[in-house]
């Protein structure tokens, strides 16, 4: 094991929640020091975006089946829809005098460490340059204006680049050492959210896997110390190409024109005081990514179309109504066919969101604890998103498991053990009732060995988990139920249940789907009710 791999392994072990003790975190929450959920750059020119998503007619079922509409042209109005339905606000909630925003991209604790940037050539009504998206006001802040023919030449194709970064402090304020994990989950949710919104406009999305972190830092202006004097720094996460998949620009070619550009604005400070978490600094360094080879997509596999969901919703509606359930009723049931359709949407479909963005192999699979699914016996199931993973799992899990194929022929779903696992699900989910009261709960098992071989892939394993979660969020809404991501779980208790004794597979994210109980004390307000 290399020094980097050893450091990664130590972080992974130390950041686990255990029955005997939780991962290191703050002793209490300093509410007066809670980070501002909105990064902005005072001094940068602001461009108000139109609220145009209501004019989008694309249906959610069309996207999940891979039926994308004709591609819209790239202009200010359509770029505005892309941000509004992926990274924009979905609602405001209020309780008494307190008010807080919800967004289309979910976040652990609704803390939203994810920031986003637009890099674009000259488009109708939009100048070429680098912009920061401020979701609170649905506007773009122009960080750098670029007037250089080499920039235009680099954008030879029809499309734009979306940069994603994380402010680790926003999560660490509440979650301490484990916060880095949650930032990566949120990045995966954001990647999937952008992919869905782009597809609703007829655009393809591709993760630019080859780009190095240092290149992203310069493209998004994150390394400009003078612009972040007292402000919390942002860590580069991902770069997405939205547009013609065969005309993706080389990000390195953008650095020359950008080095001559004039930058504007200074980042706001989010908290007056900060607590440093050396373990987060360490894992950030360990997973630093250099230039790599761009992966080629696996050969497309022909799959039957997933069954239509119970609700035929527009994509704009489902993107905005997505919520994280806080409590489940413990009585709601779904049909096995509804669960099968959800799982079908987790398999790769050629050029369909969100898996069109991820051209790498599927490295995350699901262990399901089924409680209330009509047509399926309660028990423990494995869903393999890549059927080729079956031999490895059979070798790594308990030898006594049944591995009984169930469900449609094309769905790699296996019953391991018929049993009432509600108590186990509750216990594993940090004793939260929501694990037992759901229709089903699941743990996402990632191929951990890939991260030990190439440490930067540790981030990508969490991203893939977040993308799986985003699919489940939307699928649950379309099925007439609700879901929630669970970051608080006892990692090794899940491994013990499955019989995993080595580190071939590790549980990185948990999820539940069920009938939500709404908090009637809360009021819901439109996302941009004060916008003109």
Image (cartoon, grey):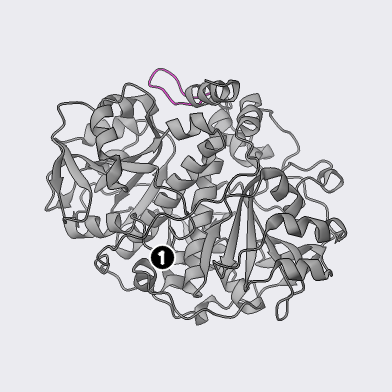
Front one among 216 and 513: 216
**Which residue is found at the position 72% from the left and 71% from the top?**
121
Front one among 196 and 114: 196
Report if residue 17 lies within the magenta region. Answer: yes
Task: Please indicate whether residue 280 sits to the left or right of residue 494 in the image.
Answer: right
- The prevailing secondary structure element of the residues shown in magenta is loop
In this view, 318 is above or below 437: below
In this view, 59 is above or below 228: below
Question: Which residue position holds label 1?
Answer: 352
Q: Residue 126: give x, y in percent of width and height.
A: 73, 75
* Magenta stretch in the rendered image: 15-24
Q: Residue 171: give x, y in percent of width and height.
A: 59, 39
Task: Please indicate whether residue 41 sits to the left or right of residue 357 in the image.
Answer: right
Front one among 505 and 84: 505
Q: Residues within 10 Å of mark 1 (few under 14, many from 20)?
A: many
**Which residue is found at the position 24% from the left and 65% from the top?**
304
**For the C terminus, which image quadrant?**
bottom right
Task: Please indicate whether residue 363 sits to the left or right of residue 100 in the image.
Answer: left
Q: Outermost residue toward the top? A: 20
**Which residue is found at the position 77% from the left and 66% from the top?**
151
Picture quadrant where residue 87 is located:
bottom right
Can residue 107 be seen by looking at this rendering?
Answer: no
Secondary structure at badge 1 equals: loop
Report if residue 526 lies within the magenta region. Answer: no
Can residue 368 be seen by looking at this rendering?
Answer: yes
Q: Residue 303: give x, y in percent of width and height.
A: 27, 62
Q: Residue 374: give x, y in percent of width and height.
A: 13, 53
- The mark tally for this picture is 1
Front one among 217 and 329: 217
């Amino acid at each position: 094991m290399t020094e980097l791999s050893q450091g990664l392994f130590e972080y992974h072990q130390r950041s686990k929640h255990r029955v005997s003790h939780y991962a290191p975190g703050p002793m209490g929450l300093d509410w007066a020091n809670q980070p501002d959920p909105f990064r902005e750059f005072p001094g940068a020119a602001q461009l108000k975006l139109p609220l145009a998503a209501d004019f989008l007619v694309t249906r959610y079922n069309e996207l999940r089946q891979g039926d994308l509409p004709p591609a819209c042209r790239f202009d200010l109005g359509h770029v505005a829809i892309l941000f509004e339905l992926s990274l924009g606000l979905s609602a405001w909630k209020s309780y008494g005098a307190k008010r807080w925003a919800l967004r289309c991209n979910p976040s652990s604790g609704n803390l939203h460490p994810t920031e986003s940037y637009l890099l674009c050539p000259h488009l109708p009504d939009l100048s070429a340059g680098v912009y920061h998206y401020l979701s609170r006001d649905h506007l773009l802040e122009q960080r750098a204006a670029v007037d250089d023919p080499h920039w235009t030449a680099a954008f030879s194709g029809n499309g734009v680049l979306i940069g994603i970064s994380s402010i680790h402090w926003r999560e660490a304020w509440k979650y301490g050492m484990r916060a880095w994990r949650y930032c990566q989950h949120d990045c995966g949710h954001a990647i999937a959210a952008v992919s869905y919104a782009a597809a609703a406009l007829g655009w393809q999305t591709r993760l630019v896997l080859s780009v190095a972190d240092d290149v992203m830092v310069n493209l998004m202006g994150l390394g400009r110390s003078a612009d972040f004097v007292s402000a919390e720094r942002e860590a580069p996460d991902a770069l997405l190409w939205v547009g013609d998949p065969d005309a993706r620009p080389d990000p390195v070619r953008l650095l020359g024109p950008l080095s001559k550009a004039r930058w504007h604005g200074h980042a706001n400070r989010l908290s007056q005081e900060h607590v440093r978490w050396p373990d987060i600094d360490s894992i950030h360094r360990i997973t630093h990514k250099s230039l790599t080879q761009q992966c080629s997509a696996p050969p497309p596999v022909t799959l039957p179309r997933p069954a239509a969901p119970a609700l035929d919703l527009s994509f704009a509606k489902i993107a905005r109504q997505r919520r994280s359930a806080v409590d489940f009723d413990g009585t709601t049931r779904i049909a096995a066919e509804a669960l099968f359709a959800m799982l079908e949407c987790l398999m790769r479909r050629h050029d369909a969101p969100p898996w069109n963005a991820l051209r790498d192999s599927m490295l995350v699979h699901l262990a399901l604890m089924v409680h209330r699914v009509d047509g399926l016996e309660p028990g423990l199931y494995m869903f393999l998103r890549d059927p080729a993973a079956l031999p490895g799992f059979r070798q790594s899990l308990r030898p006594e498991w049944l591995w009984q194929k169930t469900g449609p022929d094309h769905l790699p779903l296996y019953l391991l053990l018929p049993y009432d696992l509600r108590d186990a699900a509750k216990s594993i989910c940090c004793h939260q009732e929501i694990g037992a009261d759901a229709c089903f709960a699941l743990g996402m098992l990632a191929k951990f060995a890939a991260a030990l071989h190439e440490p930067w892939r540790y981030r990508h394993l969490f991203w893939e988990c977040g993308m799986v979660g985003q699919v489940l969020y939307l699928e649950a809404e379309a099925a007439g139920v609700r879901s929630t991501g669970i970051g608080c779980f006892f990692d090794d208790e899940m491994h013990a249940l499955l019989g995993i004794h080595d580190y071939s597979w590790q549980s990185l994210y948990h999820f539940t789907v069920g009938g939500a109980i709404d908090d009637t004390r809360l009021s819901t307000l439109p996302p941009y009710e004060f916008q003109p």
